[in-house]
Amino acid sequence: MVLTARILDRNRAVLAVVPEAFDARYSRRPLSATEVMVSVPRDSPGLVHAVRGNLLEVWRGQTLEASGRLELRDVSGGIVTLTAYTEEILLKDSRLPASYGAVFSGMDAADVIRACLDGWAVKRIKTAVEWATWTGISKAEPVDAGGGTLWLTRDGSGKYERDGYAYYRFNSSDFPGFKSWDRIRWAADYPPDGLVYTTIQYRFGTSGAWLPSATWPSDGDPSQTLTGERGVLPDELGLSLGGATNAILEVRCNLFSDDQDSKEEGEVGTSGTSPRFYALEVVARTTGAIAVGSIPASTGVTMQAVNADAVTAFDVIRDACEQAKLDFQVVQGQLVVAEAFGLSLTSSVNLVTSEGRAALDEPSTIEVLTLAGEPISYQSEFVTVEVPI
Amino acid sequence: MIAPELVTLTDGAEGFATALIARGPGTGINRMQVTVRNEAAITKYGLREAVEDFPDAVDAADLLAKAQARLAEVSDPAKFQQLTVRVSGHTEPFKLGQRVRVSDGELGFATTARITGVDVSGEDVTLTLGDAPASLLDVLNARDAEERRDVALGLPAPISVQLVPAPTGVIVLVQLGANSRAVGVEVHCSPVNGFAPDVSTLVARGPGARFEVTGLPTAIRQFFRVRTYDDRGNFSPFTDQISTSARGVGTAELVVGQIDITNAERPDAALSVKTSAGAEVLRLGNIAGKAGVPAGTQYGLWGTAGSGVFIEGLPLIVHAEDYGSNSMLSGLVAGLAPGTSVALSATGSAIPITIPPIPDGYRMRAVWIGNGLDLYLRLLNPSEIQRGYGVPERWGAAIELRRADNTWSPTPWSDPVGTQYTALRFSSGGRVTVIKTTPAAARSPEFWFTPQGTVLLMFVPRNI
């Protein structure tokens, strides 16, 4: 069978077909991106396209034997060896936001896997300079303390104002590859037994009512009406935006204080307490490079303790598959999730060695078998495999 | 004898990224974070994000600078390529960090790289080389095999080429590197700046280090590039182009004066260039105390004023003089109503300018006057002082400079060196529109021209 190597660009357009390929080597392991190697003569036409990031396909006759993204080129004498990693490697290009695991906690593993196929883009306001980029502000001010914070201002008598706010505008065009709004996350003071409060509101566009419009009284004396979302795990879960695709998102940080009179020891001329916003983050989803091939509607396995602090989509999908006892592959840009790949060959293939037979009564000890490059799977029957002596 | 063998040329992948999420000190979302992207690399290689913490970032600007510097490293494919060369016969041990020169005629490249790994086995040493200056793997398929063979294995370009103008010709002096196996030199010449050498530009070829190119027109700059070749017909790369002009017969000739190794033997001239008439036009040596040299500078290069020698590195001198309200120029214009447009017929008084000491070899290049030239309209009748404002529409010849002998300079930037300018005045020819006078009638407004801006004078070395 003639072995050929094809080089494709990232959009899968064929750039070159190298006819004289030889010494193709590859391996497959569950939940992994593995190497695909092939050698070609150094003067092969089209080899100039064999650059990092393009795709490599190894064809045996009319059959695609292996494919992956080009990562390495070795030149030695008159031979160039091209090394790619199977397409699961593409899932390593996408990073999750910080402390994102809580978003996945409690979700079905299949939903988590689907959610990882799009990318993420984050805009965060943290430093005093960034807090000062407000679109509108009232009785609040950035303070260059604690790495950058947003505080209430004081009134003419030195007391902190009862309430104030600042709001910030985010344009979808500022998020490369924007697909939809994901969530707002923030870190702020909200002591359960205190007299200061913070809430978040948002709106899509530059005018209109702020959402959510929920109100409730504070615990202070005199009490005041609090508006907006208090949030649970606001710096991890935050406030979901439901996948909206509006061009503009405005986020409003509300600060409330029922303490205008307390004084620190030695404090003269001022009084009261201000809550603080420490960070505000908007997360958007971006268009991913991998499409859904075949993913179960549900697995019945609920994700627990997901480690997703700036890890890659590959890491999360691997964890989800491990919890659900599934495997995954990316083939020609599509993600396929299943217990096993390919049809059972037990009724048609019997691998017999020349030296003897080895009966496997515990097939699970072998993870994947291949035959001429094709993954094979097995049922409960015994399988005879060829064993090197 | 050293026997090197190129083992592999590898384009690595570990650590390569085209976008970087940089995180400052802190945890979770309560920390500075910036994402930097190398758009050119993303276009070429796709989006590959990496995360890196910078706990020592002091503020957002610092974090951004650190992130950009790091991204520049991790998104440069050349940083990830690696050569492996097996060497035998080298008696001195190789050390990490040393740079070596590597050439490969098959691949068609010659470059230098830093030793990043040494593995010794008996007499053989395997060197792992990194930090090569270019993407060597781009040579793949970039040239055909024939062309690659023409690029010499280990045959460097000449290390030095000098041109000496001669009557209607140029003498080309070529110096090859030590141990070069070149057997000859090709000299190419063209009057075209940036020319690409080909058979039509070949003017000399053969062994030796001195070539005389004759029959060149005088006073026309000629450009030269040189390469070497070996006994197998391989060629080195060409040198960068250098240029000179053939001199005419009997014209003034620059000759190199005495060159001393230390200024102790000749404290005032380590290198002296003179005309054939003996006039010194260029000198290198101890110039401490020479005016115009920054304090603390002990050595430098300077030329005699008017010699036509271009001098690099001499400082420009910019003098700023601020003129306040006590340097008014006045002109009386009567009976103006709002909206009236009048021509300025009066000529302003001269204003003294204090010129700083200017070293020999400098001349004045330019004069600027700032934007603060206000026109005040002062009303003298009745006695209370009110002011309106006018806007100059055109100044015409706005300034003139007067020399110390009280004559006006028509073109001050071409005056001889040492001319002292002592006055600035405003000439007639301007025009103003009165915006406001209160009240309009029966007043005697008077214009006061008040150049409250800063006047800048720039002096440059004479031959710039």
Image (tube, rainbow, N blue to C red):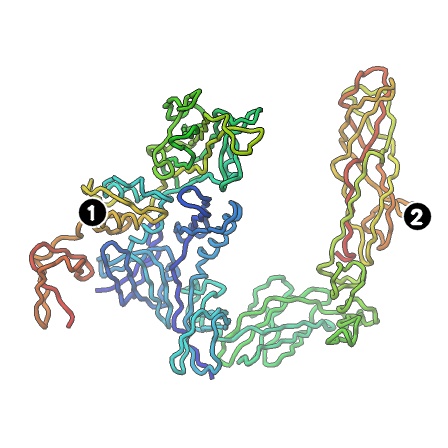
Foreground pick, B461 / A277: A277
Pick the front one: B225 or A140: A140
Determine the CA span between mark 1 and mark 2.
Answer: 99 Å
Asked if marks 1 and 2 fall on the same chain, the answer is no
Quadrant where the N terminus of chain A lies?
A: bottom left
Q: Position of residue A170 (x, y in %)?
A: 45, 34
Where residue B341 appears, x then y in whole percent?
A: 79, 24
A361 lies above or below A246: below
Callout 2 amino acid: Asp
Q: Which residue is mark 1?
A: A324
For this rendering, which residue is in front, A227 or B318? A227
Image mark 1: chain: A
Q: Residue visible at 9% across and 63% down?
A: A384
Q: Is residue A60 left or right of residue A69?
A: left
Q: Is residue A172 left or right of residue B378?
A: left
Judge the density around disc 1: few (<14), some (14-19), many (≥20) Cα neighbours within 10 Å: many
- The residue depicted at 41 percent of the width and 71 percent of the height is B84
Q: Which residue is mark 2?
A: B405
Residue A208 is drawn in which quadrant? top left
Q: Pinpoint residue B313: horizontal percent, then vertical percent.
A: 71, 59
Q: Position of residue A348 (x, y in %)?
A: 8, 58
Residue furthest out toward the front: A265
